[in-house]
Image: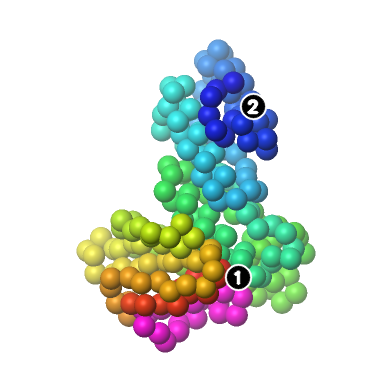
Amino acid sequence: MISDPICETPQYVEFVRFFEGFFAYIKKENAPIDFFSWHCYDSADSAAAMQRYLERRLAELGYAGLETQLNEWNNAPQLEHRGTSYAAAQAANMMIKMQRTNIDILCYYDARIAASMYGGLFNPMNHKPLCTYYAFKAFGELYALGNEVACESNDTKLLALAACDQEGDRQALMVVNLGEDTAFTCDFAAEHVYLIDAEHMMEEVSCDPAVLPIAKNRIP
């Protein structure tokens, strides 16, 4: 067994054993491989740790740069979390943390409009989007700009991701608060501030963007 902290985590022992056995087999058979896919219904921290493990081991095994797909994930699948600020914040948490890895594809499970424990984006009763949907919409706004901008937070419970367009004329920042109520201080003034939680579906709010109060599990 490879020496790595992730290998000692009980829920990942079988995952790692399969991974190592699978790549030992395809190397022995000289079999082609186009991508490696995996699933995770654990925390964003666990998913990011596993992705970093995959990237390191793939490079060590001679498959550096192989496409990796986390093509099923949901870090708040319990029914009691559906439509809550917690679920929206955890989805944003996952996307921000996985953005800092080399993952190629990240697929939430799932977006069905039906009675399902995993269907976390839409209300199955009225088919309207839940607040978690807007966490994806906010990330999509940054993605559409095309260029990630260096962005750091000095609070491990307060995550931030920024982007701009090619010319630098348009910028956007997504912040998620996983901790207790706090205030977010930034060194630029935003023209528009949008709030995502169980009561606000990416609604524009009036506030001072330089010192922005953020309640727990909110995305401004």
Q: Distance between the Cα atoms at labels 1 and 2? A: 35 Å
Q: Is residue 170 visible?
A: yes
Amino acid type for the residue under numbered disc 1: Ser
Does residue 196 show up magenta in the picture? yes
On the rendered structure, is 166 left or right of 193? left
Q: Which residues are magenta?
A: 192-209
* Image coords of residue 23 (percent x, y): 56, 22
* Image coords of residue 101 (percent x, y): 43, 44
The mark that comes first in sequence, 1 or 2, is 2
Viewer-closest of 11 and 19: 11
Q: Is residue 22 above or below residue 6?
A: above
Amino acid type for the residue under numbered disc 2: Phe
Q: Is residue 15 visible?
A: no
Residue in the picture at 50% in, 33% down: 54
Residue at the extreme top of the image, as rendered: 28
Q: Where does label 2 land, which residue?
A: 18
Which type of secondary structure does the marked residue at label 2 adopt?
helix
Residue in the picture at 59% in, 17% down: 25
* Image coords of residue 43 (percent x, y): 60, 50
On the rendered structure, is 118 left or right of 150? right
Q: Where does label 1 land, which residue?
A: 85
